[in-house]
Image: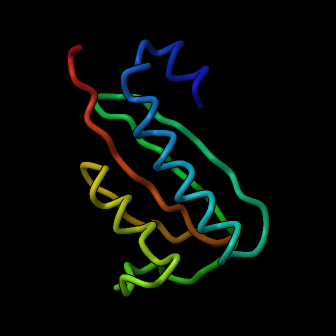
Amino acid sequence: MREQLAQWDLAALEMTTELLVSELVGNVTRHAPGPCRLRLLRSRVLVCEVYDGSPTTPRIRRAAQTDEGGRGLQLVAALSRRWGTRFLAEGKCIWAEQEILDL
């Protein structure tokens, strides 16, 4: 991910992208079967896509202050311009979109 962002001259998005990818891939590791695949797409925005083998819809949880987890999708929603889920025959893709600013 870092290498690709550097090739695209988007190193300024590295920290946010790393956090988004970490949360999305972490959710797949904890909650979904099958292989996990990451794809980055660059157009007018930067899109991070994470694929898994589960047909389950991800949902934002309301974590209590004492909970150690349950805030990942809240973080994704806060850090991304938009995010969502696409369902596929073999599972789903969760994506998060970031603005590409002229830096």
* Residue under the point 61% across and 20% down: 3
79 left or right, relative to 93 = left
x and y percentages locating residue 21 in the rendered image: 54, 48
> With respect to residue 69, does 76 lie above or below?
above
18 left or right, relative to 73 = right
Q: Residue lying at the far left in this picture: please name it.
A: 102
21 left or right, relative to 46 = right
14 left or right, relative to 31 = left
Q: Residue lying at the far right in this picture: please name it.
A: 34
* Residue under the point 44% across and 55% down: 95
Quarter of the image for the N terminus: give it. top right
* Residue under the point 41% across and 68% down: 73
Quarter of the image for the C terminus: give it. top left
Q: Nearer the viewer, residue 35 or 29?
A: 29
> With respect to residue 89, does 25 lie above or below?
above
Q: Quadrant of residue 30?
A: bottom right
